[in-house]
Image (cartoon, helix red, strand yellow):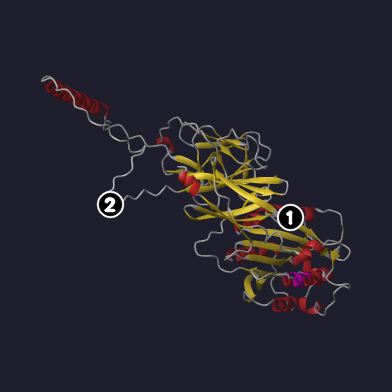
Amino acid sequence: MRLSPSSKPIRRKTTKRLDLIGAARIALAIVLGGALLNAGADTGAANRIEQLLHACTQPQGQRLDCDYRLLTPEAVTGFTAAIEGVSLPNPRTTDYPYDGSSSAILFLIDAGTFHNLAVIETIVEHIRLLIGLSKPHHRVGVATFHGNPTLTLPIGSVPKDIVAAVRTLTSPQSSQSTQHDAYKALRILGQYPAVRKALFFFTDAAASSESYYQSELVAAARDANVSVYSVAYVSSEQPSPALTSLKRLSRETNGRLIRADPRDFSLPAGFMTQPYAAIDSGGQISIDLSAAVTAGLSGPRWVTLKVALQGRSIEVPLPVTVPEPAPAVHAAGQAPTPSAAMPVPPAQLDAPSASPWVYPLTAIGLVTLIGGFIYLRQDRAPRADEPDTLSVPRAYLVRKNDAGTRCVITASPWRIGRGKNNEMVIPDSSVSRHHAEIMRNPDGTFAIKDLDSLNGLFVSDKKVRRSMLSDGCEIDIGDVRFTFAIEGADVSPSDVTVSEPQTMNRTVHAELFNRRSQHT
């Protein structure tokens, strides 16, 4: 069953006012904005593990809070968490929306669609119906773009005022492309302090496929934590390059493509009755880390969160910093309890009287030992004409948009891949079993090499087989992006003395982030 906005095509006397024929370019945005987050909250980039998106913060040392949602809504039957074999208490869960949360949803009409009167009027009616399904945590506003973005109605306007504004839009004098307006819309949407954000892009898919997919547009959506839902009104059931681009745009930004019925432009009933089901799915989980502190764990660690679904489960690696245990406080005048860290001194026994020759011989031995030590120190002291040896700078892979999450490169070669026998393990289907390796050169510089991976290796957005690495360059391992960083990057490589790196004994599971655009 499909839901149509009306049984007859909508024909209103707005054709002349809208100036729909020609090169008119206007972008409409209806913003369902968000209330302010709690102080100290972090809306960092969401991370994708299979069908689950999550973004976590650690507001307190012994607690980790994560917002999560499912790309395809389904029932979650339970959560369990552990740190390196130490079971944690069952996470506390709260359904979305929870206190202080909100969803920001942006409706954007493709500028090129305004030449098709039947489609544009259907889109306006669909927007009216979708606004009517908004919930209390969706706050409504409207923006139009005429070269510069301006808010026509303030955030909090009532839906009927927004619908009225949509129906009375006039064409601007200047002409702007849809992509140009889309970038502005994403920037405005990205500034809203909402926990979740989505863009609904309404189009007739009549332009070229390149008009609907650009890697820069995908990157802008990811930077703003926006999922794109493409709503396509096409007159044929056959697939087209434009639809393929729209589907790719939606998939790579964690949204989906919704196709209208080509006969009457009605949208699927499931979408028109629950359009925000995926955006509002999931909720918040709080993980208590106190058991890890009690077990003696501290410092940077990885929580393994297991999400139980119907008939399957998902394992999600989450980086945390386990705090040091608080020092024990003793009452005044009370001696601390003996422990393994504070051995009890043995009881002193009466020793036999020493020989009168023991003390002189001991003094002579001490003088000889001190003299030898001073001689060796002088012999090994650096000469004035010898330069001091500089320490080797440490190198890291840092996760983009997540300050503080970094993996130290501790070996050469330092392998990266999906297999568990790599120095860095990335559990993502876009990453090959042995994807790439980083090497430290004899002069102290670093290089990366592709290990015949399926999806390739990219350094600074260029596909490479082997490349030198410099401080700050970006590396794409499949769909996962890192920034290469060097501690002490101002040290000249020619002045560096390289020591043999140590082999890393335990693997590091990289927390995944949003899917990067694929290069050809």
**Above or below 20: residue 419:** above
Q: Nearer the viewer, residue 309 or 2?
A: 309
Q: Which residue is mark 1?
A: 210
Badge 2 marks a residue whose secondary structure is: loop
Q: Left or right of 108: which side holds 1?
A: right
Residue position for label 2: 332
Residue at x 63%, y 64% (from the top left corner): 97
Residue type pointed to by label 1:
Glu
Q: Say which amino acid is labelled 2.
A: Ala
Place residue 498 in its image quadrant: top left
Quadrant where the image shows the N terminus:
bottom right
Residue beneath the point at 60% across and 62% down: 195
Label 1 vs label 2, nearer the camera: 2
Residue 240 found in image quarter = bottom right
Query: Is residue 76 rendered magenta in the image?
Result: no
Residue 154 visible? yes
* Sooner in the amino-acid sequence: mark 1 or mark 2: 1
Residue 129 lies within the magenta run: yes
Task: Give the alpha-carbon distance from disc 1 to disc 2, as whole Å.
Answer: 76 Å
Over which residues does the magenta segment extend?
126-130
Magenta region, main secondary structure: helix
Residue 399 on image: x %, y %:
55, 48
Can residue 268 be seen at all in this image of the molecule?
A: no
Q: Is residue 503 above or below residue 486?
A: above
Q: Is residue 171 left or right of residue 102?
A: right
Q: Which quadrant would the C terminus be assigned to in this image?
A: top right
